[in-house]
Amino acid sequence: MDKSALIIGSGLGGLSTALRLSSNGYKVVVLEKHSTPGGRMNIIEMDGFRFDMGPSFMSMTYEFDELFNTVGIKNPVEFEELEPLYQVYFEGKDKPRRIFKDLEKLEKEFSDVEPGLASKADAYLKRAGQFWHDTEDKVVKTNFDSMFKYLLKLSTVPWKHIPYLYRTMWSEVEKQFKSEEVRIIFSLVAFFLGATPFHTPAIYSLLNYTEMRHNGYWRIKGGMYRLIEELVKILKDRGVEFHFDTEVVNIGSNSGKLYEVIDRNGKRWQADIFISNADAASFRGQVLGRKKFNEEKLDKMHWTLAPFTIYLGVKGKVDNLEHHNYFLGSNFKGYADTIFTSSIAPQKPYYYVNVLSKSDSTCAPDGCENIFILCPVPDLRYKKDWSDKEELANTLIKDLSQRIGFDLEYNTMVKKILAPDDWAAMLNLYKGSGLGLAHDINQVGAFRPKNKDEHFSNLYYVGASTTPGTGLPMVVISSRLVTERISNDSTLS
Ligand SMILES: Cc1cc2nc3c(=O)[nH]c(=O)nc-3n(C[C@H](O)[C@H](O)[C@H](O)COP(=O)(O)OP(=O)(O)OC[C@H]3O[C@@H](n4cnc5c(N)ncnc54)[C@H](O)[C@@H]3O)c2cc1C
């Protein structure tokens, strides 16, 4: 008889694991707290407008091909590369800077402030690339059985990379580039990790390499949610069962094994193995009641910034926006230093804007545009009360309108705002942290919550806060690692 697997959560991590396990002969059931699948990679629909709720682009597309190829299917979604990667509006400047993968074009764009940029960027990216290739297989794509084995593996990474560990990303770009604007642009990727370049180790300049040389940035034709729709369709065809509005709040265990999980309505769900796609740290604290992950301990961990998001459907076409746009203020360091721990909403926010309707005409009515605004803000540990969310949304919309010369407020047809407390309540994101646990050196590799439980021999984890880390491709790698873990687990007989 087939073995049964129960997956808690239908984020990309949960769905990718469901695909791999169903292909390995498991009978899979997925329980999801929210009313739709996808977790953070979700969808919002309002009066003819369709918005991707969270992620708007991805790197390392080959990881998605691998996921489908492993189970004998051709990747059903089509990727479209972004070039320029994005554009950045600096405060006080009318014209945005466009960021190209093509270094000659990039040099031309910054010729007034950073002569010789192409060769400087080339040297910077080569170094970051060496680090990536020296660690990708050894550290990122490996399951570790013990801290000793992890440290042993780390010791085989060439020692020339050691300075990357203790320098910050900002000091790395400061060394390489003269212009403040170029430094800021090369350090923006730290925000993709939900952190700031002043708190992020220089090792993450490898993200500059993955965006600008290795694989680039891609969107999914028809919107990011297409990936979730395709996955769910394939899984249902393969007999995977889904139960939405079903939140796991408790467990039943016996002799070091889980035999059931219990949902909020008291229904009991049995299986041979269990995989939590709910946050690997907070699930251990809040559902399993582990002391090491109680609220006090969780609060002391480093979490990524919380999202404040606005979904705007507007009448008219907005010319001055690309697919990806950043709007920055004039005090980068000051902003970055306070953004994590402030108890008030940012007064001069830095934010990101995505316009899906630029590339997909089906996501907005004719002659309209759909605009997604994402502003990183402090999580609920620092700012608990978001009853002022309309005010912050108005500040953002007003600022954006002025900078692009288009009255968004006047032309708004639909609007939805999600503050950190909404994100937390909707998907159980710990205190509203957007990307889960941060990637400090002491929170990655064997230091990150493991993908196999410490006490229950048949409980595993997949997703952003377990290994290897957060972001869409990492979560797909996480599903491969946990599946390998399950396949090689001699305690499962
Ligand atoms: C605003 C925003 C923008 C982002 N942009 C990008 C981007 O452009 N590119 C990129 O690569 N990454 C981006 N990310 C990060 C990316 O979305 C995540 O790393 C990834 O989606 C995490 O997937 P996951 O499967 O680990 O978790 P999730 O997507 O959070 O899925 C976990 C699921 O488990 C469910 N769940 C939780 N607890 C329970 C429970 N007790 N019982 C039942 N169900 C439960 C949740 O409801 C959720 O559906 C972004 C994230 C955010 C928030």
Image: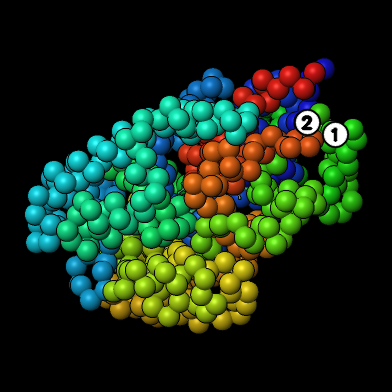
Does 161 sit left or right of 476 as displayed? left
Mark 2: which secondary structure?
loop
Mark 1: which secondary structure?
loop
Q: Considering the image in quadrants, where does the C terminus appear? A: top right
- The CA distance from mark 1 to mark 2 is 6 Å
Report the residue at 32% width, 57% height from top.
170
Does the closest atom of ligand 1 sit within 8 Å of the Cβ of label 2?
Answer: no
Query: Label 2 near label 1: C-beta < 8 Å?
Result: yes
Residue 256 is marked as 1
Report the residue at 49% width, 50% height from top.
440
Report the residue at 67% width, 20% height from top.
488
Q: Nearer the viewer, residue 236 or 488?
A: 488
Residue 400 is marked as none
Question: Where residue 318 appears, x then y in whole percent?
Answer: 31, 67
Up the image or down, 83 lies above or below 404; here it is above
Mark 2 is on which residue type?
Answer: Ser
Choose top left, top right, bottom left or bottom right for residue 431.
bottom right
- Would you say residue 65 is visible in this rendering? no
Residue 457 is marked as 2
